[in-house]
Every structure is written in C-alpha cells, then in structure tokens.
Amino acid sequence: MELIGRIINKGAAEGIALVSESPISFYGGIDPETGNITDRENKLYGQCIKDAILVFPFGSGSTVGPYVLYQLKKNGMAPKAIINRECETIVAVGAIIAGIPCVDKIEVGRIKTGDKVGVDAEKVTVG
C-alpha cells in the first residue's frame, strides 16, 4: 500500500510502525533518556520509540516538545521517522531540528503497529 502525504522534513527511513491512536506530547509524554512513552493515558505506555516509525494523529503539549525530540536524537533514542495525520508546529520544529524525516496528511488509521513502513519524501509505503 502506498500513501502520499505532505513533506514536513525531507528524508528516508524504513522500520517497524509504532502507532498511537491518541496525540503524543513529547514534553512529559516521552522520556528523552530512554525513549519510553511515559504518558500513562497513552495505550503505548512503557513502549520505546527508538528506531520505530512513530505514527500518531497529531502532537500536543508544550513548546518544549521540539527540544525533547532533539534530545531523543542526541541520546540515540529517536524514532527513524514520524508520520502524522496533521503535523502541528511543535512536532514539525522538533523533527526539523532533530533531522527526523516527517510526513503528514496521511491516513494514519491505515497503518498498524508492527507494519513494515518506508518513508521517502512525501511517499509512505506500508507492507
């Protein structure tokens, strides 16, 4: 399956999808030292985003979020790529300063945790 979206930050990556049905806040929702999701309200609580293709509808939370994404990258705990339904400014800035490929305008409900996913510019390949 091929999905076409909008480029937020160029780049290419392949990996296994980790899909959150709910928004993600990087500030307070993910530990930048371990890459683990710390938001107890998220169904992915306790899972690590390291090297995953992180898929979620949109971000939420503080303007500190981009710095958490940058810290995740510096610590080697960042996702390989981010896919959103709607990428808002907090996630976009974080992806850009951390150098993480990011795409939005994607039907994220068509991607399931465990799917093999490729991201290349605006194209997302699932399967």
Image (cartoon, helix red, strand yellow):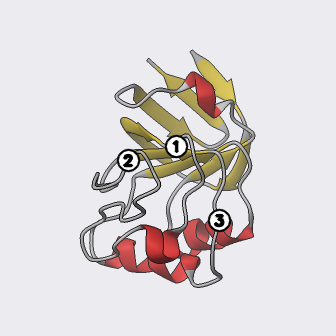
The residue most toward the front is 41
Q: Give the label, 3 or 1, closer to the camera.
A: 3
Of residues 108 and 10, the one drawn nearer to the viewer in this rendering: 108
**Residue 125: image location, x then y, percent:** 53, 25
Which label number is shown at residue 124?
A: none
Residue at mark 2: 44
Q: Quadrant of the N terminus?
A: top right
Residue 98, visible in the rendered structure? no
Give the answer, above or below, for where 39 lies relative to 123: below
Q: Are marks 3 and 1 in contact (CB under 8 Å)?
A: no
**Residue 103: image location, x then y, percent:** 64, 47
| Sequence order check, earlier mark of 2 and 1 | 2
Q: Quadrant of residue 18?
A: top left
Of residues 119 and 113, the one drawn nearer to the viewer in this rendering: 113
Tell me which amino acid carries mark 1.
Val
Residue at mark 1: 55
| Sequence order check, earlier mark of 3 and 1 | 1
Residue at left offset 40%, top offset 52%: 80
The Cα–Cα distance between marks 2 and 1, rounded to whole angstroms, is 11 Å
| Sequence order check, earlier mark of 3 and 2 | 2
Q: Is residue 26 left or right of residue 121?
A: left
Tell me which amino acid carries mark 2.
Leu
Tell me which amino acid carries mark 3.
Ser
Give the answer, above or below, for where 3 lies relative to 66: above
Q: Is residue 77 left or right of residue 122?
A: left
**Residue 47: image location, x then y, percent:** 29, 51
Residue at mark 3: 60
**Residue 99: image location, x then y, percent:** 50, 67
The Cα–Cα distance between marks 3 and 2, rounded to whole angstroms, is 16 Å
Residue at left offset 35%, top offset 46%: 52
Residue at left offset 70%, top offset 45%: 104
